[in-house]
Image: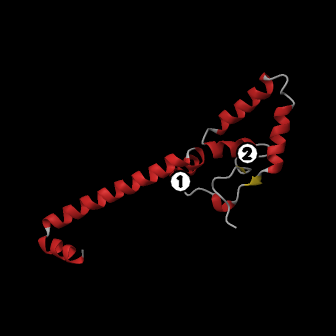
Amino acid sequence: MEPRRTKFYLDKKNGKVMGVCAGLADYTGLDVTLIRIGFVLLMVGTGTMGGFGPLAYFIAGWMADDRPRELDYADREDKKFWQGVRAKPANSVREVRARFRDIDRRLADVEVSVTSQNRRLADEIEALR
């Protein structure tokens, strides 16, 4: 079974203790330093919840799966895309459709540019339609 890109995984490659904060940063798209600072502030700032923070951290580290190697991102744009899919799936679908519309428009512009200057090529393209 192929791993899902929309699932939370531990990121032990970029993690410090168990990879929970790095996994949260990868999942949400936030900077890992902000996640770590927020976690420390949560633990220190809430006196009654101080024991719950580390417990939740270790439970998450124990229950979550390690991030599979095949989910490594090819480039920064790929990483940003999948973080957007996890955060707002409907926006991601809209973005993909907008990209395809843009590509289609650009291809139409190329076709107009090529065919407007070469009448014989324009006739061949029309014959194919």
Element type where label 1 sits in the image: helix
Q: Nearer the viewer, residue 125 or 57?
A: 125
Report which residue position mark 1 lands on: 78
Report which residue position mark 2 lands on: 15
Instruction: Decide if residue 123 is on the left or right side of residue 49.
Output: left
Hey, what amino acid is under mark 2?
Gly
Q: Earlier in the sequence, mark 1 or mark 2?
A: 2
Instruction: Decide if residue 114 is on the left or right side of residue 65.
Output: left
How many labels sit on residues? 2
Residue 127 locus on image (x, y percent): 20, 77
Hey, what amino acid is under mark 1?
Asp
The quadrant holding residue 115 is bottom left
Q: Nearer the viewer, residue 2 or 44?
A: 2
Q: Assess disc 2: are there few (<14), some (14-19) or many (≥20) residues with their C-alpha within 10 Å of its C-alpha.
A: some
Instruction: Decide if residue 64 is on the left or right side of residue 113.
Output: right
Q: Assess disc 1: are there few (<14), some (14-19) or many (≥20) residues with their C-alpha within 10 Å of its C-alpha.
A: few
Query: Measuring 66% from the left and 58% from the top, which residue is drawn there?
Result: 4
Mark 1 or 2: in front is 1
The quadrant holding residue 32 is top right
Element type where label 2 sits in the image: loop
Residue 59 locus on image (x, y percent): 84, 44
